[in-house]
Image (cartoon, grey):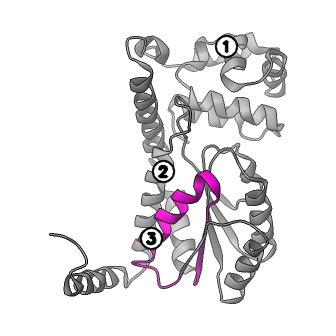
């Protein structure tokens, strides 16, 4: 676990059974890790979209006497140079603040990748699965489609699952019957109930579920064998997902490293593309 503010918060929350509301608070705290030691319970409640008493109950669930005790603990473990991100960004407009928040999300992702073992394990699982189903619905469909597009250049059989409905479980069954051993899911808020149910079904069908989600406290966590977190930005009317997209590319790299013929497949594609005049020089 990283010694970053976000990493310390993740460590603090591990081992606790949290309610959906408490997971929402935990996710908000991780996303605003640099600010949290300086926020009042009312401010944190507003950021998380919950009630102030919910914040108090959350602190008690973590073993503290109340939110003030939790905040004192966070200030004690915060590095001396840590200051409020809000103060740093006060001179920026809302668009700049959204970009700066995404940069912070990418910084958190870089800190998490200091331990490459989870991504390397995911790469092995995805490379070994023939076929490889890739699931992403609604907000996450573009992440799944982008991964599947590039993965198809190095993996022999990638199956994109980006539409819900009654056919979704049929397609999971078909992949399992064809020999799939793992499923990759991109899950972003707001989380469709259908995705949670699909992951539960996939595990019941014997597939190992690897999930990219915005937080280790996302609703899909309980139905994932390996969850890789990458925060989304919430500063604009619609969430931004630079970190999940980049984590998807990192997973592609890790998977390609486990496929001995990946480079040959890429070279074959490039040769055929050149012969067809597929791309403009």
The residue lying at 47 percent from left, 18 percent from top is 85
Residue wearing tag 3: 149
| Front label number (3 vs 2) | 3
Q: Name the residue under label 2.
A: 115
Q: Is residue 122 left or right of residue 40?
A: left
Residue 159 pos. (x, y %): 57, 77
The residues tagged by marks 3 and 2 sit, at their Cα atoms, a distance apart of: 27 Å
| Nearest to N terminus: mark 2 or mark 1 | 1
Q: In this view, does 97 lie above or below 214?
A: above
* SS class, disc 2: loop
Report which residue position mark 1 lands on: 43
Q: How crowded is mark 3: few (under 14 residues within 10 Å), some or many (20 or more)?
A: few
**Circles 3 and 2 in contact, beta carbons < 8 Å:** no
Q: Residue at x 41, y 70 (%)?
A: 150
Assess disc 1: are there few (<14), some (14-19) or many (≥20) residues with their C-alpha within 10 Å of its C-alpha. Answer: some
Foreground residue, 259 or 281?
281
The range drawn in magenta is 130-157
Mark before the other along the chain sequence, 3 or 1:
1
């Amino acid at each position: 676990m990283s010694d970053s503010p976000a990493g310390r918060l993740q460590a603090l929350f591990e081992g606790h059974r949290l309610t959906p509301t408490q997971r929402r608070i935990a996710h908000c705290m991780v996303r605003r890790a640099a600010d949290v030691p300086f926020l009042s319970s009312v401010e944190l409640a507003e950021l998380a979209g919950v009630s102030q008493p919910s914040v108090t109950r959350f602190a008690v669930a973590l073993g503290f006497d109340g939110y003030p005790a939790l905040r004192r603990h966070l200030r004690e473990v915060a590095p001396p140079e840590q200051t409020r991100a809000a103060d740093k960004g006060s001179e920026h407009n809302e668009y700049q603040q959204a970009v700066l928040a995404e940069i912070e999300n990418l910084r958190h992702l870089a800190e998490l990748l200091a331990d490459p073992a989870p991504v390397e394990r995911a790469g092995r699982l995805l490379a070994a699965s023939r076929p490889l189903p890739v699931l992403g619905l609604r907000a996450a469909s573009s992440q799944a489609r982008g991964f599947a597009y590039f993965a198809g250049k190095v993996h022999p059989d990638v199956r994109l699952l980006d539409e819900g409905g009654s056919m979704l479980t049929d397609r999971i069954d078909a992949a399992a019957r064809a020999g799939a051993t793992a499923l990759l899911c991109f899950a972003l808020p707001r989380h469709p109930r259908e995705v949670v149910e699909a992951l539960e079904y996939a595990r019941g069908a014997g597939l190992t579920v690897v999930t990219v989600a915005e937080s280790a406290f996302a609703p899909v966590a309980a139905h994932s064998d390996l969850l890789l977190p990458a925060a989304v930005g919430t500063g604009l009317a619609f969430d931004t997902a630079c970190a999940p997209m980049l984590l998807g590319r990192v997973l592609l790299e890790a998977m390609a490293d486990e496929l001995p013929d990946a480079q040959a497949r890429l070279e074959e594609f490039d040769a055929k593309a050149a012969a067809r005049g597929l791309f403009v020089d």
